[in-house]
Amino acid sequence: MAAAPVWSVDPRTGKRREQVAVEATAAEVDAAVRAAHDARDALADRRVRADLLRRAADLLDGAGERIVEAADAETALGPGRLTGELGRTTYQLRAFADVVEEGAFLDVRIDHADPALTPPRPDLRRYKIPLGVVAVYAASNFPLAFSVPGGDTASALAAGCPVVVKAHPDHPATSELSAALLRRAAAETGLPAGVIGLVHGFEAGIELVRHPLVAAAGFTGSVRGGRALYDAAAARPHPIPFHGELGSLNPVVVTEAAADERAEEIGRGLAGSMTLGTGQFCVKPGLVLAPQGPAGDRLERSLTEAVSNTEAGVLLDHRMRDAFLDGVRERAALPDVQAPVTPGAGGEHTVSAGFLTVPAARLAEDGGAHDLLLEECFGPVTVLARYTDDAEVGAVLARLPGNLTATLQLGAAECAGEDAGAGACGGGSGAGASGGGTGTETAMGGTGTEAATGGTRADARSGASGAGTGADAGTGVSGGGTGTGASGGGTGAAASANGTGTDGAMAGTATAASANGTGRGARLLAALTPLAGRLLVNGWPTGVAVAPAQHHGGPYPATTSTATSVGGTAVERWLRPVVHQDTPPALLPPELREDNPLNLPRRVDGRPER
Protein backbone atom coordinates (compact mmCIF):
# COMPACT_ATOMS: atom_id res chain seq x y z
CA MET A 1 0.00 0.00 0.00
CA ALA A 2 1.43 3.38 -1.05
CA ALA A 3 2.22 5.93 1.64
CA ALA A 4 -0.35 8.71 1.96
CA PRO A 5 0.69 11.98 0.31
CA VAL A 6 1.22 15.12 2.38
CA TRP A 7 -0.25 18.20 0.71
CA SER A 8 0.32 21.88 1.25
CA VAL A 9 -3.11 23.55 1.21
CA ASP A 10 -4.07 27.21 0.72
CA PRO A 11 -6.45 28.11 3.59
CA ARG A 12 -7.70 31.13 1.66
CA THR A 13 -9.29 28.80 -0.92
CA GLY A 14 -9.16 25.35 0.62
CA LYS A 15 -7.36 24.06 -2.48
CA ARG A 16 -4.26 21.87 -2.59
CA ARG A 17 -1.08 23.67 -3.61
CA GLU A 18 1.50 20.92 -3.93
CA GLN A 19 2.53 17.57 -2.55
CA VAL A 20 5.57 18.09 -0.36
CA ALA A 21 6.10 14.69 1.27
CA VAL A 22 4.50 11.39 2.17
CA GLU A 23 3.45 10.24 5.61
CA ALA A 24 6.22 8.41 7.43
CA THR A 25 5.94 4.67 7.94
CA ALA A 26 6.78 3.02 11.25
CA ALA A 27 10.12 1.98 9.77
CA GLU A 28 10.89 5.56 8.75
CA VAL A 29 10.02 6.87 12.21
CA ASP A 30 12.31 4.24 13.68
CA ALA A 31 15.13 5.26 11.35
CA ALA A 32 14.75 8.94 12.25
CA VAL A 33 14.77 8.20 15.98
CA ARG A 34 17.79 5.89 15.71
CA ALA A 35 19.71 8.48 13.69
CA ALA A 36 18.95 11.06 16.38
CA HIS A 37 19.98 8.61 19.12
CA ASP A 38 23.28 7.97 17.36
CA ALA A 39 23.94 11.74 17.21
CA ARG A 40 23.83 12.28 20.98
CA ASP A 41 27.58 12.19 21.54
CA ALA A 42 28.14 14.71 18.77
CA LEU A 43 26.15 17.25 20.80
CA ALA A 44 28.19 16.76 23.97
CA ASP A 45 30.40 19.82 23.38
CA ARG A 46 28.61 22.97 24.48
CA ARG A 47 30.63 25.13 22.09
CA VAL A 48 29.41 23.05 19.15
CA ARG A 49 25.81 23.35 20.32
CA ALA A 50 26.09 27.13 20.57
CA ASP A 51 27.62 27.26 17.09
CA LEU A 52 24.78 25.12 15.73
CA LEU A 53 22.09 27.37 17.19
CA ARG A 54 23.71 30.55 15.90
CA ARG A 55 24.36 29.10 12.45
CA ALA A 56 20.76 27.93 12.24
CA ALA A 57 19.58 31.44 13.10
CA ASP A 58 21.83 32.94 10.42
CA LEU A 59 20.61 30.52 7.75
CA LEU A 60 16.97 31.13 8.63
CA ASP A 61 17.48 34.88 8.45
CA GLY A 62 19.30 34.51 5.13
CA ALA A 63 16.39 32.52 3.68
CA GLY A 64 13.80 34.84 5.20
CA GLU A 65 12.08 35.83 1.97
CA ARG A 66 11.62 32.20 0.89
CA ILE A 67 10.45 31.13 4.34
CA VAL A 68 7.88 33.91 4.66
CA GLU A 69 6.55 33.23 1.16
CA ALA A 70 6.18 29.51 1.85
CA ALA A 71 4.58 30.00 5.24
CA ASP A 72 2.11 32.62 4.03
CA ALA A 73 1.04 30.44 1.12
CA GLU A 74 -0.07 27.63 3.42
CA THR A 75 -1.12 29.52 6.57
CA ALA A 76 -2.53 32.88 5.36
CA LEU A 77 -0.92 34.53 8.38
CA GLY A 78 0.44 37.37 6.25
CA PRO A 79 3.97 38.52 5.39
CA GLY A 80 4.13 41.12 8.16
CA ARG A 81 3.18 38.72 10.90
CA LEU A 82 5.46 35.99 9.54
CA THR A 83 8.45 38.32 9.16
CA GLY A 84 8.05 39.20 12.83
CA GLU A 85 7.70 35.56 13.79
CA LEU A 86 10.88 34.70 11.90
CA GLY A 87 12.74 37.43 13.80
CA ARG A 88 11.41 36.10 17.08
CA THR A 89 12.46 32.56 16.12
CA THR A 90 16.03 33.48 15.26
CA TYR A 91 16.31 35.69 18.34
CA GLN A 92 15.31 32.72 20.45
CA LEU A 93 17.88 30.44 18.80
CA ARG A 94 20.62 32.96 19.56
CA ALA A 95 19.34 33.43 23.10
CA PHE A 96 19.63 29.71 23.75
CA ALA A 97 23.17 29.78 22.33
CA ASP A 98 23.97 32.36 25.03
CA VAL A 99 22.38 30.10 27.65
CA VAL A 100 24.56 27.19 26.50
CA GLU A 101 27.74 29.22 26.64
CA GLU A 102 27.00 30.70 30.06
CA GLY A 103 26.42 27.22 31.51
CA ALA A 104 24.32 28.05 34.56
CA PHE A 105 21.59 25.67 33.32
CA LEU A 106 23.87 22.76 34.30
CA ASP A 107 23.26 23.74 37.95
CA VAL A 108 26.67 22.54 39.14
CA ARG A 109 26.81 22.00 42.91
CA ILE A 110 29.77 20.66 44.89
CA ASP A 111 29.70 19.74 48.58
CA HIS A 112 33.10 18.62 49.82
CA ALA A 113 33.43 15.72 52.20
CA ASP A 114 33.07 16.62 55.87
CA PRO A 115 33.67 13.73 58.30
CA ALA A 116 32.93 16.00 61.28
CA LEU A 117 29.24 16.24 60.39
CA THR A 118 26.69 13.87 61.87
CA PRO A 119 26.29 11.77 59.90
CA PRO A 120 29.55 12.32 57.98
CA ARG A 121 29.11 13.83 54.53
CA PRO A 122 30.79 12.23 51.52
CA ASP A 123 32.12 14.23 48.59
CA LEU A 124 29.08 15.06 46.42
CA ARG A 125 29.16 16.67 42.98
CA ARG A 126 25.91 17.28 41.11
CA TYR A 127 25.06 18.57 37.66
CA LYS A 128 22.49 18.01 34.93
CA ILE A 129 22.80 15.91 31.80
CA PRO A 130 20.64 15.66 28.65
CA LEU A 131 17.80 13.14 28.62
CA GLY A 132 18.29 11.92 25.06
CA VAL A 133 16.13 12.11 21.94
CA VAL A 134 13.25 14.62 22.21
CA ALA A 135 10.06 14.32 20.17
CA VAL A 136 8.62 17.72 19.23
CA TYR A 137 5.03 18.09 18.03
CA ALA A 138 4.82 21.24 15.94
CA ALA A 139 2.13 23.86 16.49
CA SER A 140 -0.36 24.90 13.85
CA ASN A 141 -0.47 28.63 14.45
CA PHE A 142 3.24 29.34 14.59
CA PRO A 143 4.90 27.66 11.58
CA LEU A 144 8.28 28.91 12.81
CA ALA A 145 8.34 29.96 16.46
CA PHE A 146 6.61 26.80 17.72
CA SER A 147 7.38 24.45 14.90
CA VAL A 148 10.51 22.89 13.37
CA PRO A 149 12.97 25.69 14.33
CA GLY A 150 10.93 26.82 17.35
CA GLY A 151 11.34 26.93 21.08
CA ASP A 152 11.02 23.22 21.85
CA THR A 153 13.63 22.37 19.21
CA ALA A 154 15.97 25.19 20.23
CA SER A 155 15.81 24.40 23.95
CA ALA A 156 16.28 20.66 23.37
CA LEU A 157 19.36 21.23 21.19
CA ALA A 158 20.67 23.67 23.80
CA ALA A 159 20.32 20.92 26.41
CA GLY A 160 22.29 18.53 24.18
CA CYS A 161 19.29 16.50 23.00
CA PRO A 162 18.77 15.54 19.33
CA VAL A 163 15.26 16.22 18.05
CA VAL A 164 12.71 14.48 15.86
CA VAL A 165 9.87 16.81 14.89
CA LYS A 166 6.40 15.66 13.93
CA ALA A 167 5.42 18.29 11.36
CA HIS A 168 2.05 19.98 11.53
CA PRO A 169 -0.19 19.23 8.53
CA ASP A 170 -1.13 22.90 8.12
CA HIS A 171 2.38 23.95 7.03
CA PRO A 172 4.32 20.93 5.70
CA ALA A 173 6.23 22.88 3.03
CA THR A 174 7.47 25.39 5.59
CA SER A 175 8.45 22.51 7.85
CA GLU A 176 10.50 20.84 5.11
CA LEU A 177 12.26 24.08 4.25
CA SER A 178 13.06 24.82 7.89
CA ALA A 179 14.32 21.30 8.54
CA ALA A 180 16.61 21.49 5.51
CA LEU A 181 18.13 24.70 6.84
CA LEU A 182 18.67 23.20 10.29
CA ARG A 183 20.34 20.15 8.77
CA ARG A 184 22.58 22.44 6.73
CA ALA A 185 23.52 24.28 9.92
CA ALA A 186 24.37 20.92 11.50
CA ALA A 187 26.59 19.95 8.56
CA GLU A 188 28.38 23.30 8.60
CA THR A 189 29.18 22.90 12.29
CA GLY A 190 30.44 19.34 11.88
CA LEU A 191 27.37 17.59 13.24
CA PRO A 192 25.49 14.64 11.72
CA ALA A 193 22.20 15.35 9.98
CA GLY A 194 20.48 13.05 12.47
CA VAL A 195 20.49 15.76 15.15
CA ILE A 196 17.33 17.06 13.43
CA GLY A 197 14.71 14.61 12.16
CA LEU A 198 11.34 15.34 10.56
CA VAL A 199 8.34 13.06 10.07
CA HIS A 200 4.82 13.62 8.75
CA GLY A 201 1.53 11.93 9.51
CA PHE A 202 -0.91 11.16 12.30
CA GLU A 203 0.30 7.60 12.81
CA ALA A 204 3.89 8.81 12.74
CA GLY A 205 3.08 10.99 15.72
CA ILE A 206 1.81 7.99 17.67
CA GLU A 207 4.83 5.88 16.71
CA LEU A 208 7.14 8.68 17.76
CA VAL A 209 5.90 9.06 21.33
CA ARG A 210 5.90 5.28 21.78
CA HIS A 211 9.42 4.72 20.46
CA PRO A 212 11.64 3.24 23.18
CA LEU A 213 14.58 5.51 22.29
CA VAL A 214 12.55 8.73 22.64
CA ALA A 215 13.33 10.16 26.08
CA ALA A 216 10.91 13.12 26.30
CA ALA A 217 8.32 14.99 24.28
CA GLY A 218 7.11 18.55 23.81
CA PHE A 219 3.67 19.42 22.42
CA THR A 220 1.59 22.53 21.73
CA GLY A 221 -1.99 22.01 20.66
CA SER A 222 -5.44 21.04 21.82
CA VAL A 223 -6.59 19.30 24.97
CA ARG A 224 -7.84 16.32 22.99
CA GLY A 225 -4.70 15.69 20.95
CA GLY A 226 -2.30 16.57 23.75
CA ARG A 227 -4.05 14.41 26.33
CA ALA A 228 -3.99 11.41 23.99
CA LEU A 229 -0.25 11.76 23.50
CA TYR A 230 0.31 12.43 27.21
CA ASP A 231 -1.54 9.21 28.06
CA ALA A 232 0.49 7.31 25.44
CA ALA A 233 3.73 8.63 26.96
CA ALA A 234 2.60 7.54 30.43
CA ALA A 235 1.46 4.11 29.23
CA ARG A 236 4.87 3.13 27.85
CA PRO A 237 6.76 0.35 29.67
CA HIS A 238 9.16 3.14 30.61
CA PRO A 239 7.10 6.37 30.83
CA ILE A 240 8.71 9.58 29.66
CA PRO A 241 8.20 13.27 30.50
CA PHE A 242 5.56 14.88 28.28
CA HIS A 243 5.57 18.65 28.34
CA GLY A 244 2.31 19.63 26.68
CA GLU A 245 0.53 22.95 26.28
CA LEU A 246 -3.11 22.05 25.76
CA GLY A 247 -5.79 24.69 26.33
CA SER A 248 -6.56 27.87 28.25
CA LEU A 249 -9.52 30.20 28.85
CA ASN A 250 -7.35 33.08 30.16
CA PRO A 251 -9.87 34.83 32.43
CA VAL A 252 -10.02 38.59 32.92
CA VAL A 253 -11.57 40.36 35.92
CA VAL A 254 -12.57 44.02 35.48
CA THR A 255 -13.33 45.83 38.73
CA GLU A 256 -15.99 48.51 39.10
CA ALA A 257 -13.28 51.08 39.72
CA ALA A 258 -11.43 50.15 36.54
CA ALA A 259 -14.63 50.34 34.51
CA ASP A 260 -15.52 53.70 36.08
CA GLU A 261 -12.13 55.15 35.19
CA ARG A 262 -11.55 53.73 31.69
CA ALA A 263 -14.43 51.61 30.39
CA GLU A 264 -13.94 52.69 26.79
CA GLU A 265 -10.21 51.99 26.87
CA ILE A 266 -10.78 48.53 28.34
CA GLY A 267 -13.42 47.74 25.73
CA ARG A 268 -11.10 48.68 22.89
CA GLY A 269 -8.17 46.82 24.40
CA LEU A 270 -10.25 43.69 24.90
CA ALA A 271 -11.48 43.82 21.30
CA GLY A 272 -7.93 44.12 20.02
CA SER A 273 -6.70 41.23 22.15
CA MET A 274 -9.53 38.80 21.44
CA THR A 275 -9.47 39.39 17.68
CA LEU A 276 -5.70 39.48 17.28
CA GLY A 277 -4.67 36.89 14.71
CA THR A 278 -8.36 36.13 14.12
CA GLY A 279 -8.67 35.23 17.79
CA GLN A 280 -6.52 32.13 17.56
CA PHE A 281 -3.95 32.65 20.29
CA CYS A 282 -3.53 30.25 23.16
CA VAL A 283 -3.58 33.29 25.45
CA LYS A 284 -6.65 34.96 23.95
CA PRO A 285 -8.91 36.30 26.73
CA GLY A 286 -11.88 33.95 26.47
CA LEU A 287 -13.84 34.93 29.60
CA VAL A 288 -14.19 38.45 30.96
CA LEU A 289 -15.93 39.23 34.27
CA ALA A 290 -17.24 42.79 34.10
CA PRO A 291 -19.55 44.63 36.53
CA GLN A 292 -23.22 45.26 36.07
CA GLY A 293 -24.25 48.90 36.03
CA PRO A 294 -23.49 52.03 33.98
CA ALA A 295 -19.71 51.59 33.88
CA GLY A 296 -20.00 48.01 32.71
CA ASP A 297 -22.53 49.13 30.11
CA ARG A 298 -20.03 51.66 28.79
CA LEU A 299 -17.42 48.91 28.50
CA GLU A 300 -19.84 46.69 26.60
CA ARG A 301 -20.73 49.49 24.18
CA SER A 302 -17.06 50.16 23.52
CA LEU A 303 -16.43 46.47 22.94
CA THR A 304 -19.41 46.29 20.59
CA GLU A 305 -18.16 49.18 18.49
CA ALA A 306 -14.60 47.90 18.27
CA VAL A 307 -15.51 44.31 17.44
CA SER A 308 -18.07 45.44 14.87
CA ASN A 309 -15.29 47.26 13.03
CA THR A 310 -13.04 44.19 12.89
CA GLU A 311 -12.61 42.66 9.44
CA ALA A 312 -13.35 39.00 8.76
CA GLY A 313 -10.33 36.74 8.80
CA VAL A 314 -9.07 33.37 7.57
CA LEU A 315 -8.38 30.48 9.92
CA LEU A 316 -5.54 28.06 9.29
CA ASP A 317 -7.78 25.42 7.79
CA HIS A 318 -11.43 24.73 7.13
CA ARG A 319 -11.63 22.12 9.86
CA MET A 320 -10.85 24.84 12.39
CA ARG A 321 -13.40 27.12 10.75
CA ASP A 322 -16.11 24.48 11.05
CA ALA A 323 -15.27 23.88 14.71
CA PHE A 324 -15.45 27.62 15.43
CA LEU A 325 -18.82 28.00 13.72
CA ASP A 326 -20.25 24.99 15.56
CA GLY A 327 -18.84 26.20 18.87
CA VAL A 328 -20.23 29.73 18.76
CA ARG A 329 -23.60 28.50 17.50
CA GLU A 330 -23.96 26.10 20.41
CA ARG A 331 -22.89 28.70 22.96
CA ALA A 332 -25.18 31.42 21.60
CA ALA A 333 -28.19 29.10 21.93
CA LEU A 334 -27.84 28.76 25.72
CA PRO A 335 -30.45 30.43 27.96
CA ASP A 336 -29.73 34.05 28.95
CA VAL A 337 -26.86 34.27 26.45
CA GLN A 338 -26.95 37.27 24.15
CA ALA A 339 -24.76 38.21 21.18
CA PRO A 340 -24.30 42.00 20.88
CA VAL A 341 -22.02 41.18 17.93
CA THR A 342 -22.73 37.75 16.47
CA PRO A 343 -19.63 35.65 15.75
CA GLY A 344 -19.89 33.38 12.73
CA ALA A 345 -19.17 32.99 9.04
CA GLY A 346 -17.73 36.02 7.29
CA GLY A 347 -17.70 34.41 3.87
CA GLU A 348 -17.05 31.08 2.23
CA HIS A 349 -13.55 30.87 3.69
CA THR A 350 -13.56 33.45 6.49
CA VAL A 351 -15.02 34.04 9.96
CA SER A 352 -16.37 37.17 11.62
CA ALA A 353 -15.55 38.23 15.17
CA GLY A 354 -18.16 38.62 17.88
CA PHE A 355 -18.82 38.24 21.57
CA LEU A 356 -21.43 36.78 23.88
CA THR A 357 -22.84 38.11 27.15
CA VAL A 358 -24.25 36.16 30.06
CA PRO A 359 -25.09 36.89 33.70
CA ALA A 360 -22.16 35.71 35.82
CA ALA A 361 -24.61 33.91 38.10
CA ARG A 362 -25.22 31.44 35.28
CA LEU A 363 -21.56 30.48 35.23
CA ALA A 364 -21.57 29.92 38.98
CA GLU A 365 -24.12 27.12 38.61
CA ASP A 366 -22.38 23.79 39.07
CA GLY A 367 -22.79 21.22 36.32
CA GLY A 368 -25.20 23.16 34.11
CA ALA A 369 -25.33 23.66 30.37
CA HIS A 370 -23.47 26.96 30.78
CA ASP A 371 -20.30 25.04 31.65
CA LEU A 372 -19.67 25.14 27.90
CA LEU A 373 -18.86 28.84 28.29
CA LEU A 374 -15.99 27.87 30.62
CA GLU A 375 -14.32 25.90 27.82
CA GLU A 376 -11.95 27.39 25.27
CA CYS A 377 -13.47 28.24 21.89
CA PHE A 378 -10.65 28.98 19.51
CA GLY A 379 -11.33 31.85 17.17
CA PRO A 380 -12.44 35.50 17.40
CA VAL A 381 -14.98 35.25 20.23
CA THR A 382 -15.06 35.96 23.95
CA VAL A 383 -17.66 35.76 26.72
CA LEU A 384 -18.52 38.87 28.74
CA ALA A 385 -19.99 37.71 32.06
CA ARG A 386 -21.67 40.54 33.98
CA TYR A 387 -21.43 40.21 37.77
CA THR A 388 -23.33 41.96 40.56
CA ASP A 389 -20.89 41.55 43.45
CA ASP A 390 -17.62 39.97 44.59
CA ALA A 391 -19.40 36.80 45.65
CA GLU A 392 -20.32 36.10 42.04
CA VAL A 393 -16.78 36.80 40.88
CA GLY A 394 -15.44 34.40 43.49
CA ALA A 395 -17.97 31.71 42.63
CA VAL A 396 -17.04 31.81 38.94
CA LEU A 397 -13.28 31.83 39.58
CA ALA A 398 -13.67 28.84 41.88
CA ARG A 399 -15.04 26.82 38.95
CA LEU A 400 -12.28 27.58 36.44
CA PRO A 401 -9.65 25.06 35.34
CA GLY A 402 -5.96 25.93 35.00
CA ASN A 403 -4.87 28.66 32.59
CA LEU A 404 -1.80 30.09 30.96
CA THR A 405 -2.75 33.61 32.02
CA ALA A 406 -5.13 35.53 34.26
CA THR A 407 -5.63 39.27 33.99
CA LEU A 408 -6.85 42.01 36.32
CA GLN A 409 -8.14 45.37 35.17
CA LEU A 410 -7.92 47.58 38.26
CA GLY A 411 -8.56 51.17 39.21
CA ALA A 412 -5.73 53.45 40.25
CA ALA A 413 -6.41 53.18 43.98
CA GLU A 414 -6.69 49.39 43.72
CA CYS A 415 -3.31 49.28 42.03
CA ALA A 416 -1.89 51.10 45.03
CA GLY A 417 -3.27 48.42 47.34
CA GLU A 418 -5.98 50.69 48.67
CA ASP A 419 -9.72 50.90 48.32
CA ALA A 420 -9.58 54.67 47.83
CA GLY A 421 -7.02 57.34 47.16
CA ALA A 422 -4.40 57.97 44.51
CA GLY A 423 -2.25 55.23 43.08
CA ALA A 424 -0.17 54.31 40.07
CA CYS A 425 -0.92 51.46 37.72
CA GLY A 426 0.07 50.82 34.14
CA GLY A 427 -2.96 51.70 32.11
CA GLY A 428 -2.28 49.31 29.27
CA SER A 429 -4.30 49.65 26.12
CA GLY A 430 -4.54 48.25 22.65
CA ALA A 431 -4.25 44.77 21.28
CA GLY A 432 -1.05 43.76 22.93
CA ALA A 433 -0.94 46.00 25.97
CA SER A 434 0.90 44.48 28.86
CA GLY A 435 1.05 46.76 31.81
CA GLY A 436 2.81 50.07 32.00
CA GLY A 437 5.26 51.74 29.76
CA THR A 438 5.05 54.12 26.87
CA GLY A 439 5.43 53.51 23.20
CA THR A 440 5.48 50.04 21.70
CA GLU A 441 7.73 47.02 21.81
CA THR A 442 8.11 44.98 18.66
CA ALA A 443 9.23 41.42 18.23
CA MET A 444 10.86 41.80 14.87
CA GLY A 445 14.03 40.28 16.27
CA GLY A 446 16.66 41.09 18.81
CA THR A 447 14.33 42.51 21.44
CA GLY A 448 13.22 39.34 23.12
CA THR A 449 9.60 40.48 23.17
CA GLU A 450 6.96 38.71 21.20
CA ALA A 451 4.13 40.85 20.13
CA ALA A 452 0.99 39.06 19.26
CA THR A 453 -0.47 39.50 15.82
CA GLY A 454 -1.89 36.22 14.78
CA GLY A 455 -2.04 32.51 15.10
CA THR A 456 -4.28 29.60 15.64
CA ARG A 457 -4.77 26.65 17.88
CA ALA A 458 -6.58 23.64 16.47
CA ASP A 459 -9.09 22.35 18.94
CA ALA A 460 -10.94 20.71 16.09
CA ARG A 461 -8.60 17.83 15.62
CA SER A 462 -9.08 14.12 15.79
CA GLY A 463 -7.21 11.78 18.03
CA ALA A 464 -3.59 12.35 18.90
CA SER A 465 -2.42 14.16 15.82
CA GLY A 466 0.28 16.66 16.51
CA ALA A 467 -2.06 19.27 15.15
CA GLY A 468 -2.02 22.09 17.55
CA THR A 469 -0.87 25.51 18.11
CA GLY A 470 1.44 27.50 19.99
CA ALA A 471 2.08 30.35 22.20
CA ASP A 472 2.41 33.89 21.09
CA ALA A 473 4.73 35.56 18.70
CA GLY A 474 4.46 37.92 15.82
CA THR A 475 4.82 41.49 14.83
CA GLY A 476 2.35 43.60 16.73
CA VAL A 477 2.81 45.45 19.98
CA SER A 478 3.04 44.13 23.48
CA GLY A 479 3.65 47.32 25.33
CA GLY A 480 1.55 50.38 24.85
CA GLY A 481 0.70 51.17 28.43
CA THR A 482 0.54 54.73 29.60
CA GLY A 483 0.86 54.51 33.35
CA THR A 484 3.73 53.72 35.64
CA GLY A 485 3.34 49.98 35.41
CA ALA A 486 3.16 49.47 39.15
CA SER A 487 1.11 46.41 39.83
CA GLY A 488 -0.84 46.61 42.98
CA GLY A 489 -0.10 44.40 45.86
CA GLY A 490 -0.62 43.89 49.49
CA THR A 491 -0.59 41.20 52.04
CA GLY A 492 -4.21 40.47 51.58
CA ALA A 493 -5.77 37.15 51.80
CA ALA A 494 -6.16 33.89 50.16
CA ALA A 495 -4.27 31.98 47.58
CA SER A 496 -7.14 29.56 47.30
CA ALA A 497 -9.40 29.29 44.31
CA ASN A 498 -12.04 27.87 46.60
CA GLY A 499 -11.92 30.47 49.31
CA THR A 500 -14.59 31.04 51.87
CA GLY A 501 -16.47 34.03 53.16
CA THR A 502 -18.18 36.87 51.41
CA ASP A 503 -15.60 37.19 48.67
CA GLY A 504 -15.85 33.56 47.59
CA ALA A 505 -12.61 32.74 45.82
CA MET A 506 -11.19 36.05 46.89
CA ALA A 507 -11.07 35.07 50.55
CA GLY A 508 -9.27 32.26 52.25
CA THR A 509 -6.62 31.35 54.72
CA ALA A 510 -3.32 32.06 53.02
CA THR A 511 -1.68 35.40 52.48
CA ALA A 512 -0.26 36.69 49.22
CA ALA A 513 2.65 39.07 49.34
CA SER A 514 2.51 41.99 46.95
CA ALA A 515 4.06 45.33 46.39
CA ASN A 516 1.80 47.60 48.39
CA GLY A 517 -1.27 47.65 50.56
CA THR A 518 -3.98 45.19 51.42
CA GLY A 519 -6.85 46.38 49.24
CA ARG A 520 -9.15 44.68 46.80
CA GLY A 521 -6.53 44.50 44.07
CA ALA A 522 -4.32 42.39 46.32
CA ARG A 523 -7.20 40.08 47.20
CA LEU A 524 -8.10 39.57 43.56
CA LEU A 525 -4.50 38.94 42.61
CA ALA A 526 -4.27 36.31 45.33
CA ALA A 527 -7.47 34.67 44.08
CA LEU A 528 -6.14 34.45 40.52
CA THR A 529 -2.70 33.15 41.47
CA PRO A 530 -3.73 29.46 41.78
CA LEU A 531 -5.39 29.61 38.36
CA ALA A 532 -2.57 30.62 36.03
CA GLY A 533 1.14 30.69 35.30
CA ARG A 534 1.27 34.36 34.26
CA LEU A 535 -0.63 37.16 35.99
CA LEU A 536 -1.22 40.51 34.30
CA VAL A 537 -2.43 43.81 35.72
CA ASN A 538 -3.99 46.38 33.40
CA GLY A 539 -2.69 44.73 30.26
CA TRP A 540 -3.75 42.03 27.83
CA PRO A 541 -2.26 38.54 27.61
CA THR A 542 -1.71 38.29 23.85
CA GLY A 543 2.06 38.71 23.88
CA VAL A 544 4.76 36.55 25.51
CA ALA A 545 8.23 38.02 26.03
CA VAL A 546 11.23 35.74 25.44
CA ALA A 547 13.14 36.44 28.63
CA PRO A 548 14.81 34.55 31.49
CA ALA A 549 12.00 35.49 33.89
CA GLN A 550 9.20 34.36 31.57
CA HIS A 551 6.84 31.51 32.39
CA HIS A 552 4.57 30.18 29.66
CA GLY A 553 2.62 27.41 31.34
CA GLY A 554 0.03 26.89 34.02
CA PRO A 555 -2.07 24.36 35.92
CA TYR A 556 -3.72 21.60 33.88
CA PRO A 557 -5.16 21.72 31.26
CA ALA A 558 -3.04 24.74 30.34
CA THR A 559 0.02 22.49 30.54
CA THR A 560 0.84 18.96 31.66
CA SER A 561 3.90 19.96 33.70
CA THR A 562 5.11 22.88 35.78
CA ALA A 563 7.76 23.85 33.22
CA THR A 564 7.78 26.77 30.79
CA SER A 565 8.05 26.48 27.02
CA VAL A 566 9.27 30.07 26.58
CA GLY A 567 12.41 31.66 28.01
CA GLY A 568 15.82 30.39 29.01
CA THR A 569 14.57 28.01 31.70
CA ALA A 570 12.69 26.01 29.04
CA VAL A 571 15.97 24.09 28.63
CA GLU A 572 15.41 22.47 32.03
CA ARG A 573 12.67 20.24 30.58
CA TRP A 574 15.24 18.16 28.73
CA LEU A 575 17.74 17.57 31.55
CA ARG A 576 18.04 15.33 34.59
CA PRO A 577 20.35 15.65 37.62
CA VAL A 578 23.19 13.22 38.35
CA VAL A 579 25.36 13.26 41.47
CA HIS A 580 28.85 11.78 41.78
CA GLN A 581 29.71 10.53 45.25
CA ASP A 582 33.38 10.07 46.19
CA THR A 583 34.30 9.71 42.53
CA PRO A 584 38.10 9.80 42.02
CA PRO A 585 39.16 13.15 40.50
CA ALA A 586 40.60 11.52 37.37
CA LEU A 587 37.18 10.01 36.59
CA LEU A 588 35.07 13.14 37.09
CA PRO A 589 33.50 14.85 34.07
CA PRO A 590 35.03 18.27 33.32
CA GLU A 591 31.93 20.03 34.66
CA LEU A 592 32.57 18.67 38.17
CA ARG A 593 36.34 18.91 38.45
CA GLU A 594 37.84 20.91 41.26
CA ASP A 595 39.78 23.31 39.03
CA ASN A 596 36.61 24.15 37.02
CA PRO A 597 38.32 23.90 33.59
CA LEU A 598 35.12 24.98 31.80
CA ASN A 599 34.77 28.10 33.97
CA LEU A 600 31.18 27.23 34.85
CA PRO A 601 29.10 29.10 37.41
CA ARG A 602 28.62 26.76 40.35
CA ARG A 603 27.84 26.54 44.04
CA VAL A 604 30.58 25.06 46.23
CA ASP A 605 29.84 24.20 49.88
CA GLY A 606 26.79 26.40 49.64
CA ARG A 607 28.55 29.45 48.20
CA PRO A 608 28.26 30.67 44.60
CA GLU A 609 31.51 30.96 42.68
CA ARG A 610 32.94 30.91 39.19
Image: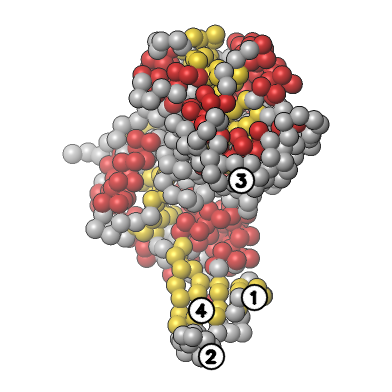
Vertically, is 363 above or below 184?
above
- Residue that carries the numbered disc 4 in the rendered image: 125
- Disc 4 vs disc 2: Cβ atoms closer than 8 Å? no
- Residue that carries the numbered disc 3 in the rendered image: 512
Gap between marks 1 and 3 measured at Cα: 30 Å
- Residue that carries the numbered disc 2 in the rendered image: 116
Which quarter of the rendered picture does the N terminus lie within? top left
**Which callout, 3 or 4, points at the residue further toward the start of the chain?**
4
**Which callout, 1 or 3, points at the residue further toward the start of the chain?**
3
In the rendered structure, the answer to whether residue 438 lies left or right of residue 514 reads right
Gap between marks 3 and 4 measured at Cα: 36 Å
Q: Secondary structure at mark 3?
A: loop
Near mark 4 (Cα within 10 A), the count class, few <14, some 14-19 or many ≥20, is many
Q: Nearer the viewer, residue 543 or 86?
A: 543
Can residue 10 be seen here?
no
Gap between marks 4 and 1 measured at Cα: 14 Å
For the point 51% across and 65% down, the residue is 190
- Disc 2 vs disc 1: Cβ atoms closer than 8 Å? no
**Which callout, 4 or 1, points at the residue further toward the start of the chain?**
4
Gap between marks 2 and 1 measured at Cα: 19 Å
Vertically, is 215 above or below 118?
above
Which quarter of the rendered picture does the C terminus lie within? bottom right
In the rendered structure, the answer to whether residue 107 lies left or right of residue 489 reads left
